[in-house]
Image: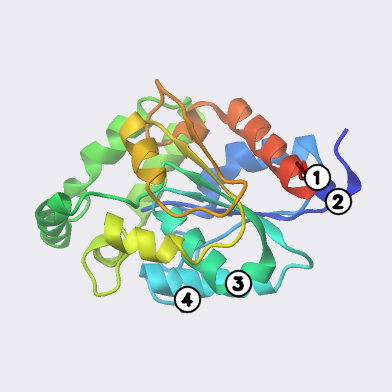
Amino acid sequence: MESPVTDATPIVLVHGWAGSAEAWHPIVSRLRAKAPQPVVAARLPGSPGAPDGGTSTIPGAAAMLAETLRAQARPVLLVGHSMGAQVTLLAHAMEPDSVLGEVVIDPAYGASHTDHAGMTEWASRIETEGHAATHDFFASAAATMPPEAGNLLLADHSATHPAVIARYLRSEYLDSGAIGFLAGTRRAAARRTKPVLAIHSTELGASRERMLPAPPGSRVETWIGHGHFLHLESPDRFVETVGAWRRSLANPVVE
């Protein structure tokens, strides 16, 4: 049975590129069935269903998330997927007293700078071709998921304006101060102060994660055989993993 401390710890979920708060539905429903803690699925600027205002960039999304953290009654467990992990990383650094710990799912950071030209070309294609430039990426991911999650993924992609998709991609990797490439990720990660659980789908991603500065108590896991949306491919396993991590943060083992 979970302690009263962990039961009350809010969980804030941050979606990835061309995603929405609704994409977390399979996770939110399972978390709420496990324990009565508050669960907040953030709506990043420009995402489907998001209120007007805000800036559809990583810094803009991080500023919005920092406001959400300050509004919570107690420190939260931050959870970010892909692009959302860039947002949680920055918000964690901005509001350390509002964070109990962080979970990043196949984070879109730590990339090799040799990918710069490819990111530049892809952003330009999105700006000229619209959704056609990203269709294959999302369609192939949806094919690995349960139908409910895959349909949500494709609906979010279609509902996100291509200009928003391109702006976020540029702010992840190409804009001044972007943190998507390894050198920028290292600088940003050094500002985190609370433990981070990083779950990767590949050994390459996990090895790059281990190259980053990490607060004491942090851990890296690799879920081999999963795709980029591993939390939606195996939602029960993911919720169990998050629950165990949350309990470990609230009741740390003192050595």
- In the rendered structure, which disc, 1 or 4, sits on the residue that comes first in sequence? 4
Cα–Cα span, label 3 and label 2? 20 Å
- The residue lying furthest to the top in this view is 225
Residue 52: image tag: 4
Picture layout, residue 81 above or below residue 116: above
Cα–Cα span, label 1 and label 2? 9 Å
Tell me where residue 252 sits by quadrant.
top right
Q: Do the CB atoms of the residues marked 1 and 4 lie less than 8 Å apart?
A: no
Q: Give the residue at mark 1.
A: 251
Q: Residue at x 40, y 52 (%)?
A: 212
Tell me where residue 254 sits by quadrant.
top right
Please name which of the two marks, 1 or 3, marks the residue nearer to the observer. 1
Q: Give the residue at mark 3.
A: 95
Q: Which percent across, then down, holds residue 187?
A: 37, 65
Picture layout, residue 205 above or below residue 236: below
Q: Do the CB atoms of the residues marked 1 and 2 lie less than 8 Å apart?
A: yes
Q: Residues within 10 Å of mark 4 (few under 14, many from 20)?
A: few
Identity, as a three-letter code, of the amino acid under mark 3: Glu
Please name which of the two marks, 3 or 4, marks the residue nearer to the observer. 3
Identity, as a three-letter code, of the amino acid under mark 4: Asp
Between residue 198 and residue 18, name the one nearer to us. Answer: 198
Cα–Cα span, label 1 and label 4? 40 Å
- In the rendered structure, which disc, 4 or 2, sits on the residue that comes first in sequence? 2
Between residue 2 and residue 20, name the one nearer to us. Answer: 2
Identity, as a three-letter code, of the amino acid under mark 2: Val
Q: Which percent across, then down, holds residue 96?
A: 62, 68
Q: Residues within 10 Å of mark 1 (few under 14, many from 20)?
A: few
Q: Give the residue at mark 2.
A: 5
Cα–Cα span, label 3 and label 4? 24 Å
